[in-house]
Amino acid sequence: MSDKNKGILLLLLSAFGFAMMSAFVKLSGDVPTLQKTLFRNLVTAVISFGFVWHHKERIFGKKEHQPILLLRSALGTLGIVFYFYAIDHLVLSDADMLNKMSPFLLIIFCAIFLREKAKFYQIVSVIVAFIGTLLIIKPAFSIEALPYMAGVASAVFAAGAYTVLRVLGDKEKYYTVVFYFSFFSTVVLVPFAVISYEPMSWQQLIYLLLAGLFATLGQFGLTVAYKFAPAREISIFFYSTIVYSALISVIVFHQPPDLLSIIGYCVIFGASFYMFVRNNKAGKAAEPLQNKGTLNSR
């Protein structure tokens, strides 16, 4: 199997992991959002700690990277809290698709904070994706719009976390970054979860532990996938999570998305697919120049 196909399979597996995480979070019922987030990240922290220990890496990374790791963890924690709130109050596939706005927001954040020039086709994709978001949200400016705003906020904070990760690059091992984030969010959320704690049944506890397990599968699958192939070649397959979530919404929760939401999904996916195709073309056009530069350097 080629590296590209391995990357695709891992992304499909990762998307399935995140979709199952969302399903188990929703199945856990009326447990407070912060309590759900705590259990999700606690499981991931335990598993990722095993990786750090096995590879004999620094548990909390290098001293000079602490500000970046802290900022990434804070943004990631807020992103998950808002995402879980959206999951609890929306059709599962709606919450998932709003969260998938993060790659488009990442383009904006990288242009603002990292001075990375956005290409014209990327700007077009962002505008089209925003229109798709409005179709899902159907703005009514009422209390009912709050869960949709939470879904958008989850994408905003996730994009912020990914922007910080761009700054960090490969300076830390991926399992160290995952452990740091999971440990940070667990410690920060404990006091809030204790204050708002609600007793859980064994079934709810199992659901939340499974949510943490599938979240870890999704996180590591996503990370390893991009080690086999560049994001521009395979990232589109991560949107398969929308298909999984839509099927789960209909089969498990009996909550089919409405027509406008489905149109919104298609618009956002279309924008993502357009950007995927253009990124591939740009990458292939750059390869001969890179190869030429390598030959000249020899």
Image: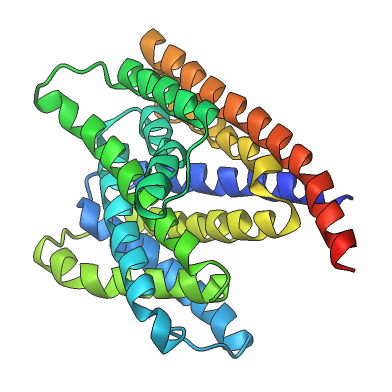
Asked if 32 appears above or below 284 in the picture, the reply is below
Asked if 57 appears above or below 44 in the picture, the reply is below
- Within the image, what quadrant is residue 114 found in? bottom left
Asked if 84 appears above or below 118 in the picture, the reply is below
Task: Judge from the rendering whether residue 149 lies leftward or rightward of residue 56; answer left or right.
Answer: left
Q: Residue at x 51, y 77 (%)?
A: 176
Residue nearer the viewer, 171 or 12: 171
Quadrant for the C terminus, please: bottom right
Residue 207 on image: x %, y %: 40, 53
Residue 275 on image: x %, y %: 58, 30
Q: Is residue 247 visible?
A: no
Task: Judge from the rendering whether residue 243 lies leftward or rightward of residue 81; answer left or right.
Answer: right
Q: Residue at x 51, y 31 (%)?
A: 122
User: Which colour scheme appears in the figure?
Assistant: rainbow
Q: Is residue 242 visible?
A: yes
Residue 166 on image: x %, y %: 49, 60
Residue nearer the viewer, 82 or 177: 177
Task: Judge from the rendering whether residue 200 lies leftward or rightward of residue 237; answer left or right.
Answer: left
Residue 197 on image: x %, y %: 15, 62
Task: Judge from the rendering whether residue 282 lies leftward or rightward of residue 164; answer left or right.
Answer: right
Residue nearer the viewer, 162 or 248: 162
Q: Which residue lies furthest to the front in this view?
A: 296
- What count of labels does the image hold? 0
Q: Which residue is drawn at 43% across and 73% down?
A: 45
Q: Residue at x 51, y 17 (%)?
A: 266
